[in-house]
Image: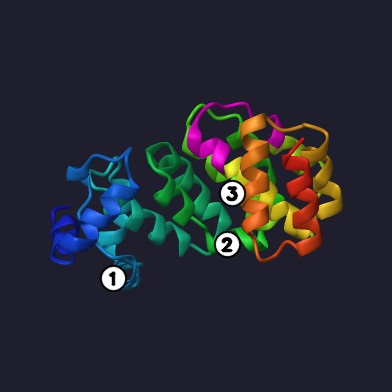
Amino acid sequence: MSSIPEELFALRDEEYRAFHAALMPGVARERIIGVRMPALRRYAAALAGSPEAEVFLRALPHTYYEENNLHALLLMREKNFEALMPQLERFLPQVDNWATCDLLKPACFAKNREKLLPCITRWLGDAHPYTVRFAIEMLMTHYLREDFSPEYPAWVAAVESDHYYIRMMQAWYFATALAFRYGEILPYIAEGRLSPWVRQKTIQKAVESFRVTPAQKEELKALRRR
């Protein structure tokens, strides 16, 4: 398994490593190689489907941050939902930062929303914070438009956590939901259904969003002052 880390180190950019390490306070600097995402995506595309990739996907846990990102990129290419899920369930407990979590967007989920939903409900109750964050992001990505149900934001609001990156994802979810479902989501802000921190961060993100109308932003600003 030494060839993949060696090839990742061959792609190292020291200036990028220093910059990116500052964005990842929870990841030890020595675990960050410093590979820019376009280069990592090209490497994943070249590696996908090879025997080496199959061995790599079974070799958990990984040592380096970029190995986890490479793992996520390879999983995202799997088109078969049933084939993906056992691999994804093995990988989620290894995710230890917001960037790897947010990178992980399996393409096959879009055509398998009905099958995905029970997994999301289970992940929302997981003890691992980045599994919870991933679950909320999948609700945001796949269930705010035609597949929306009023129970979904209630699920997100019901998540109780002091973990910064869970609370940030809750705020991101509700700010995005305001852009698509303003009338249905506004009561979560107006009626205090969210924790004070998530509520304020939601308003901040929504006010900064280009998808929320000026009139809606003014209403949200007035609610923020209450």
Compared across the picture, whether 72 is left or right of 133 comes to left
Q: Which disc, if any, is residue 39?
A: 1
Q: Which residues are the magenta region?
A: 157-168
Residue at the image point whose x is 55% and y is 30% from the top: 126
> Which quadrant holds residue 60?
top left
> Which quadrant holds residue 18?
bottom left
Asked if labels 2 and 1 touch by Cβ distance under 8 angstroms, the answer is no
The single residue placed furthest to the right in the displayed view is 183
**Nearer-the-camera pick, 222 or 66:** 222
User: Is residue 211 among the parts visible in the rendering?
Assistant: yes
**Nearer-the-camera pick, 128 or 216:** 216
Q: Secondary structure at mark 3?
A: helix
Compute the Cα span from label 1 to label 2. 23 Å
Q: Secondary structure at mark 1?
A: helix
Q: Earlier in the sequence, mark 2 or mark 3?
A: 2
**Residue 22 in the image: x percent, y percent?**
29, 48
Q: How many marks?
A: 3
Kind of residue sitting beneath label 3: Glu
**Nearer-the-camera pick, 74 or 15:** 15
The residue beneath circle 3 is 137
Q: Earlier in the sequence, mark 3 or mark 1?
A: 1
Q: Is 165 within the magenta?
A: yes
Q: Assign the C terminus to one quadrant of the image.
A: top right
The residue beneath circle 2 is 108
Kind of residue sitting beneath label 1: Ala
10 Å neighbourhood of mark 2: few (<14), some, or many (≥20)? some
